[in-house]
Amino acid sequence: MQMIAAPAFLAKRAAQPDLEVLDVRTEEEVKALRLAGDVYYLPLDCIEAAAVRALRKKPDEDLYLLCRTANRSRMAAQILEDQGARNLVVVQGGIEACAALGAPMLRGA
């Protein structure tokens, strides 16, 4: 598993808006605040490699994992790696860091 700082992630996403991002927070958290744009959602308690593979459009490219601060993203990455997944990148600081840096966000359901 790789790590990327939130500023570097946001710069990369601005340059490549089609980056694949997986948010592993709960449904309630996602409804309250989420990253604008195309983001896959799969709560940590549902993480398994087969489900993630089914979501992905570009499975050979990096998948950026996002949660509130990065703890659940690291857990999700470990679960996925244990099941054979590769090219996983955890966004350090998670959604909180992205929001603090002014990333476009959606709020509410």
Image: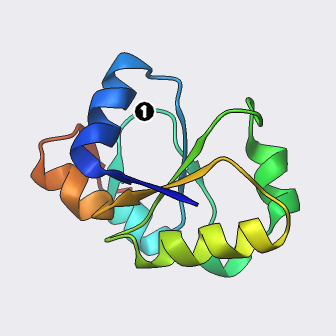
Q: Quadrant of the N terminus?
A: bottom right
In the picture provided, is 78 more to the left or to the right than 32? right
For label 1, the residue is: 37
Q: Provide residue 73's location: percent of width, then percent of height.
A: 50, 69
Q: Quadrant of residue 94?
A: bottom left
Q: In this view, does 4 lie above or below 11?
A: below
Residue 20 vertical placement versus 52 (above, below): above
Q: In this view, does 99 lie to the left or right of 73?
A: left
Say which quadrant the C terminus sits in. bottom left
Q: Which colour scheme is used?
A: rainbow
Query: Toward the viewer: 60 or 21?
Result: 60
> Where is 65 relative to 26, above or below?
above
**Residue at 12% over, 46% down:** 101
Q: Which residue is drawn at 53% across and 24% down?
A: 18
Q: In this view, does 69 lie to the left or right of 59?
A: left
Instruction: Name the secondary structure under disc 1.
Output: loop
Q: Residue furthest top?
A: 15
- Name which residue lies at 27% across and 64% down: 93
Q: Where is residue 56 in the image (x, y as percent from the top left)?
A: 74, 39
Mark 1 nearby-residue class (10 Å; few <14, some 14–19, many ≥20): few
Task: Return the residue nearer the eye: 53 or 105.
Answer: 53
Q: Can residue 35 be seen in this view?
A: yes
| Residue 7 percent location from the top left of the image | 22, 43
Total numbered badges shown on the rendered structure: 1
Residue type marked 1: Gly
Q: Left or right: 81 with respect to 12?
A: right
Q: Can residue 26 be seen in this view?
A: no
Which is more toward the observer, 106 or 1? Answer: 1
